[in-house]
Structure formats: C-alpha cells, structure tokens
Image: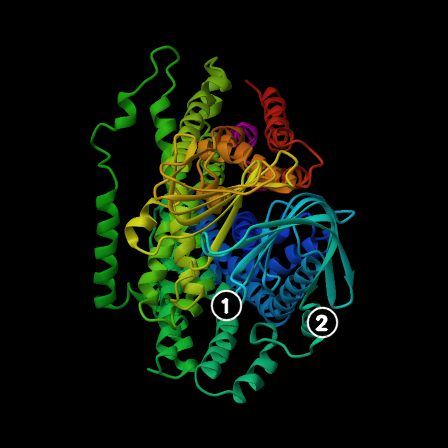
Amino acid sequence: MKRVGSLISRYLMTSIIPYFVSSWLLLSVILFVQQGSRYADIFFSVNVPANLIWQLAIALIPNVIAFTCPVAMLVGTIIGLTKMQGDSELIAIRAAGVGGIQIALPIAVLGILMSAFAFIVNLYGVPLAAALVRNVALETAIRKLESPIEPGAFNSEVAGYTIYVKEGDLETGRWKNLFVYSEDQSAKTLRLITSRSGRIDTSGEVSELVLENASVSTLPMAPGAGKYVAENIGDVRFAIRTRRAELIEKLSSSELTPAELGLQQLSEYAATKQGPERVEANILWQRRVVLSVTPLIFALLGTVIVLRFNRGGRGFGIFAALCVAIGYYVLAFLGEQLARVGTADVVVTSLIPIAGSILAIFWFSYSTRIRFLGRVTDLLRDVFRSLRPDPKRLQTGNLFVDLTTGLRDFDIVRNLIKNFVLTLSFLTTIFAVFTAFDLWRFASVIEGGTLLLAKYLFYLLPFIYLQIAPSAAMIATLATYSIKSRQNEIVTWTSAGQSVYRLLLPCLLLTLVLGGANWLVQEYVLPRGNRLQDEARSLIRNQGVPANLSGRYWVASENRIYSFTLASDNEKRACFPVCIDDLTAFEFAPNGVNLQSVFRSDRAVWESGRVRFLAPTEKRDLSAGKIAYSIVNGAELAEPLNPFAELRTKPSHLNSAELKRQIPAAESDVEQRNLAVAYEKKYTTLFLPFVMALFTAPFSLSLSRKGKAATVGYAVGLWLLFTGTGGVFEQMGLSGMLEAQLAVWSPLVIFSLLGIFLMSKVRT
C-alpha cells in the first residue's frame, strides 16, 4: 500500500508540475514585459551601456516571479487535477482507497517548497532587486549628465538657456547646427545664438558647451520696444553645472529605502518611524510574508475546489483559478486599505486574505458534512449546471458540417474562441491585479484614489489586450488541438484519409481575423486609451496633482524653430495640438545658422499643410542685411507636417498614419530609428497571432498521449524563444545596427519558416 501511495504521489506531481511551470513562465514573461515598459527610456537608450541594461533586466525578475509563483501554483493545481478528473483518474485513485487528504498531501508538499522559494525571493531577492534598480537609475542619470545635450531635443535644464542641437555624433560629442535661446529680464531683450558646429567639454562637476564661430541676434522682448542687433562673436562657452557629485553621493550612500530592506531591517526601520511612514513599512513587511505563504494556500485551495466539484472541464479550471485569484487579492487590497485608514492593526488586516482562504478550504472540504454549507455548495453546483448546454438538445456544432470534407469547422472555431476568451480573461486579470498592486500604495493615500486607479485600469485595457492577445491565441491553439489529439479525433480524421492541414485551416483563418481585429483596436482605440492611461498614471504617481503644463514649449521643423505656450482654457486645450498660443517662429537660412525672419502672434493654427496666424502678426525680416518691421494680417508659413504635433511624439499615442507622418519630422537619427521601429511593429500586429499559431500547431498535433507535458513545455519554450529573439532584433534596430524593417520583420519571417518546416514533419 505504501508503494501504491508513493506511485500515486509521483503521478500527481507529474500531472501538476508541467502546468505549473508553463503557467509560471508564461505569466512571468508577460509581467516582465509590463515592468520593462516602465523603463523603456533606459532599455532603448543608445547612451546606456549594455551592462546597465542587463542589470535592470535582472533586477525586474524577483518581483515578477514572487508574484507569479503563487498564481502559477493555483493554475497548475487546478488544471492538472481537472485533467485527471476528466480522465476519471481521480475516481480510480479514490477507488483504490486513497482519500482526499492523501491526494492533497503531495500537493501541499509542493506548495510548501514553493512557499519556501517565495520566502527566499521576498527575503533576499526583492530587496536586492530594489537596490539594483535604484543604482541603475542613478548611474543612467550620471551618464546623461556627462552629455546633457541630445540631438533633436530641446534642453531647458541649463539655467537661463534653452539649447537645441539639430545633428550630432554621440561617440565623439561633436554637434552641428546649434541654437541657444536666453532672456535678459533686466534689459527686456532675448538673445539667439547660433553656430554651425560645437562640442561638450566635461571636467568633474562642470560641463561646458562650446560653440564655434557663433552668431548672436539680440531682439526686444516686447514687439517694437527696442533694437534688433546681429553680430558674429566667434567661439563662446556655456558652463553647465550638473548634479553629478550629488548623484555619486547618493549612489555610494549606505542609506536604503524601505523597498531595499530585508525583513529584519524593515521591522527595525518601522520601529523608528511614526504615522504613515510606519504604517507603510509594516504593510510592506506583511505583504512579503503573505506573498511567501500564498503558494501553499493556493495549492490547498486548488485541490479542495477540484475534489469538491466532481466534473468540470479546463474551462471550469481556468474560471475557478480566476475567481480564487481575484478574491484573494481583493481581500489583500481591502486589508491594506483598512490598515492605512487606521481601522485595525496592520498585522490583523494582513491576515484577512489568509483567514478568508482558510474558511474557503474548510467550506469546500466539509460542506458535505454540514447541512448549511452543503446547501450553499449545491446551489453553486446548480448555477454551474445551468450554464452548461442541455445534452438532449441538438448541439450547434452539429449544425455546421463541412460540405466537402466532413470536418466540423464550426466546432473547432468555437473551441478556439472559447479557449482564447478564457485565457485572455485570466491573463488580463493577472496583469491588472499586478499593476494595481504596484500602484495601490500611491492611489490609497489620495482622495478618490480608488476610483482613479479603476479608471487607469480601464484605460489600460486596450494595451493589455494587445500585449496578451497573441499569447492567448497560442495557448488556445495548443489547448484545442491537444484535446482533440488526446481524444483520438485526429487519428480518426487521418485514418479517414483527411489531411491534417485541412484540420488546421479554421485555426489559421481565425488567427488572421484576430490579427485584423487587433489592428482595428490598435489604430482606433489604443492611441486615445494610452493617452488617458498615461494621464491617470501621472495623477496617481503625483498623488492627485495634475502635471504642470505651464511654460514655453519648443519644436523644430526643417528650417524653423517655434516657441509657444499651451492654451489655458478647456476649449483651446481640446483643439491642441492644432491650436497654440503666444507663438514665436524663428526662420533660418538653408545653412541653419543665419536668422532670416521672426514672426510673433497671439494665436495660430496648423491646418492643410500650413501654419496660419489667427491674430495680427509682427514680422521682422533680416534677410536683406537690414531689419524690416511690419504688422501682417492673415500671415501663413508653409509646413507640410504639423510641427506642433511633435509634443505628442510618443509612439504609443499615435496610430500608424500619424506615426508615418512623424518619422520625417524627427530631427535626430535616434528619434527617427525609434519611430521607424515603432511604425513597423504596428504592422506586425496583423500577422502576429497567425505566426504564433503556425509554429504552435505542430506541437499540439502530437498523436501520442505520452509526453503531453513535454509538448506543452516545448511550445512555451518556443514562444519564449520567439519573444526573446524579437526583443534582440528590436534592440538592434533601435541602435542602428539593422534597418527598422529588417529588425522588426526578421523574427516573424524566421519563425514562420520554422513553423512551415515543423508543419511539414507532421503526419498527414
């Protein structure tokens, strides 16, 4: 009997572990991408060395795996046991005299091991990761301070000056076509200094911007209130004092933030604080402990749920896992909020999700023995049964039979859609919960923070969907055809002389349709959603204080530089970036150095390829060697592209047409590469689900019942390889090593060819 128990325990482990590992890998990669997007300016910066990028990537891993380990334990347990239950293996095990406690015991041991692993990660990995992220951020800031001027960008960090460099070589630090703007309030004048070339000299704490053979133009700040003077002044130096020493001091400082402290240090830190700081430190301590025991809790919850509800497919398993995860983390959020408002002690509130889980385990385990609990369970079972179709009715899948081959394409499509929706719902929920966990400490301390966080998550949904949809399509393909293979349907079809390729046709067509739907979301929903979610996230991070939109803005076109302010009233804001106020336009000669004209107007608008001044415009013409002053009504400047839209150049805020128009307007090579890669990636949205299905299908068509875990593992491994390869090629495109088209499309072509090769090896 002992021998039988050992064999059953091993069999239970082999049924659960593959789903646990696959879920863990999948969830970790998805959430890693979400975390990495927060540091996109570091990951895709050409000024940041590769070792810092790798350090940052490694630093993001502990927080991700500490969160995904419990969820993966829950998914692996429920899906693994549900599969055994569907195959009547649990019935056979119970018929052999093995009780529920004996079934749960090896799963509990696995949960204990994962809890120990999660505890180690939370004890050592998470604090070290937080310290590493801080060091990378400081070192990146130091690198940027060594060369604060970037080609194609306006820099206003130098006190009293606005500096613009049109072109430059980052390696040598040589710049071309420089523009420096400054105001002298005492003299009521402004100065424009231009130079064909220049450089940055750095020595210790001070950097110097050196302009060679510079020209200066002095203009009155008030229209018509002074003289215009132009002269050549030779070489000129601007001292740029940086915060390099301050940052180096922070980098070497031994003072750690709460996120960088271990449990013992965090406890000592909390003891020295009072008020909200003490509460937040205690919440962080309790959160790490609770996340450490969560794998064990989820393992037990998953086990008792499956054992209590006797029949259920994988859909039920995913739905049950989703409900458990949502309920558990909602209780965790509730406990933290109660602690912050002072309703109860932090220790007590941190036990709320654990206490709720223990009650749920007790309910599922003993509801058959307690009349009241049994009635509630029966009611839930009746609800689930009512959702299932009546087996006596004619099933819709039988109404759609292929007229040429007899394959039930509708049944395949229906299963693909069902698995896709279930997977998408589950992954979206986990993504949203992880994001909420990350922002909850900011949202909870501001008035209306909960509603603001809910709005942010709502606006984030289009982004989450496009991030997850290709992966969900891959899992749906794998699940649908693996089940049909296990049920010997594929053997039946191939034995009848039908081609396996014909069996895959509905899947491939459906993924092409999905790609088209994703494209529509990307073009018509995502840009506005990203703008709104960025605004909401900024409000949450700034504790409810809106971003400061005051001050002057600068943009450059081919031979003009524009300076303007944003409108203050809501009506004018609504039309931005088409309408702008207080516009000054500096027009230069083709060499980019000599100032030719200056235009000033209270209001202007861009439309139909031109900038139209809507108010009387002051014009100063310097092109003929003397200054000609005039007031012009209805003045216009030809601008094929909207120069004011450059304030909205974040690729995620633009659709493909806007992004395409933005590429030629970019002044620097770095910006052009970033925009070009983003533009090409938008078109891959059309084909990404199809490519995923193409190289996943051969694994799911395995006809052997043995090695199913290996089949799932290989498919997920190939997906990870595809994701990693795409990231490497994208980085090569951003750095200029490859053209944008080659960098973005090469991974899709490579894996499409790999999918075709693997498909050719499938028995037909």
Mark 2: give few (<14), some (14-19) or many (20+) Cα within 10 Å: few
Residue 167 appears in the picture as rendered: yes
Residue 98 appears in the picture as rendered: no
Magenta residue span? 692-715
Label placed on residue 291: 1
Mark 1: give few (<14), some (14-19) or many (20+) Cα within 10 Å: many
Q: Which x, y percent locates residue 453? A: 36, 61
**Picture quarter with the N terminus:** bottom right
Mark nearer the N terminus (1 vs 2): 2
Residue 694 is one of the magenta-drawn residues: yes
Q: Which x, y percent locates residue 456? A: 37, 56
Identified by mark 1, the residue type is: Leu
Identified by mark 2, the residue type is: Ala
Q: Is residue 411 above or below residue 112?
A: above
Residue toward you, 132 or 669: 669
Q: Which x, y percent locates residue 33? A: 55, 49
According to the picture, the residue beneath numbered tag 2 turns out to be 245
Kind of element beneath mark 2: helix
Q: Between tags 1 and 2, which lies in front?
A: 2
* Residue 497 placement, left or right of 589: left
Q: Splitting the image into 4 quarters, where does residue 156 fall?
A: bottom right
* Residue 383 placement, left or right of 684: left
Residue at image point 39% right, 57% down = 536
The alpha-carbon separation of the residues under discs 1 and 2 comes to 39 Å
* Residue 37 placement, left or right of 645: right
* Residue 652 placement, left or right of 210: left
Label placed on residue 607: none
Residue at image point 60% right, 33% down = 744
Kind of element beneath mark 1: helix
**Picture quarter with the C terminus:** top right
